[in-house]
Amino acid sequence: MKNFTVRLNISIESNFDVEIEADSHEEAEQIAKDMIWDDELTGDITANSEITDERYDATQEFVCSNCNHHFTERQMTDKEACPKCDTPIPDNELLY
């Protein structure tokens, strides 16, 4: 098996109403904002959330058998070798 790091980018929207007593629109919006950042609406946010976009980006990881340097495919040279000591990566570890 090969090792990978997968970056997940998940965009989530949550839409719901909260009844708030206030003297103005601005005050009501500020109270709602404060409730969100004070974690008073976490349950409502979670219950009403929907994934609107998702992206995944996998990067293969390597450990050099010669110098034990940890690196990713993005750090590897064009000659498919360790960027620190230039030891070639074994063919069975490479993806083609």
Image (cartoon, rainbow, N blue to C red):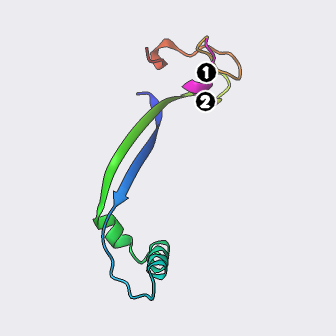
Asked which secondary structure carries label 1, the reply is loop
Q: Residue furthest front?
A: 24
Asked if residue 13 shows in the view, the reply is yes
In the rendered image, the vertical position of residue 64 relative to residue 39, given as above or below: above
Q: Which residue is identified by label 1?
A: 76
Location of residue 84 with respect to 25 vertically, above or below = above
Instruction: In this rendered view, identify the residue nearer to me: 1 or 83.
Output: 83
The outermost residue toward the right is: 85
Answer with the quarter of the image where residue 14 lies.
bottom left
- Are the residues tagged 1 and 2 within 8 Å (C-beta)? yes
Label 2 amino acid? Phe
Q: Eyeballing the image, is 80 above or below 15? A: above
Residue 34: which disc? Answer: none
Q: Position of residue 92 (x, y in %)?
A: 45, 15
Please name the residue shown 43% across and 43% down the image.
Answer: 8
User: Disc 1 residue type?
Assistant: Met
Observer able to see residue 63: no
Q: Position of residue 50 (x, y in %)?
A: 30, 55
Q: Which residues are magenta?
A: 70-78
Quadrant including the C terminus: top left
On-image quarter of the N terminus: top left
First reached walking from the N terminus: tag 1 or tag 2: 2
77 horizontally vs 11: left or right: right
Q: CA gap, disc 1 to disc 2?
A: 7 Å
In magenta stretch: residue 71: yes
Residue plotted at (60% across, 23% down): 65
| Mark 2 lies on residue | 71
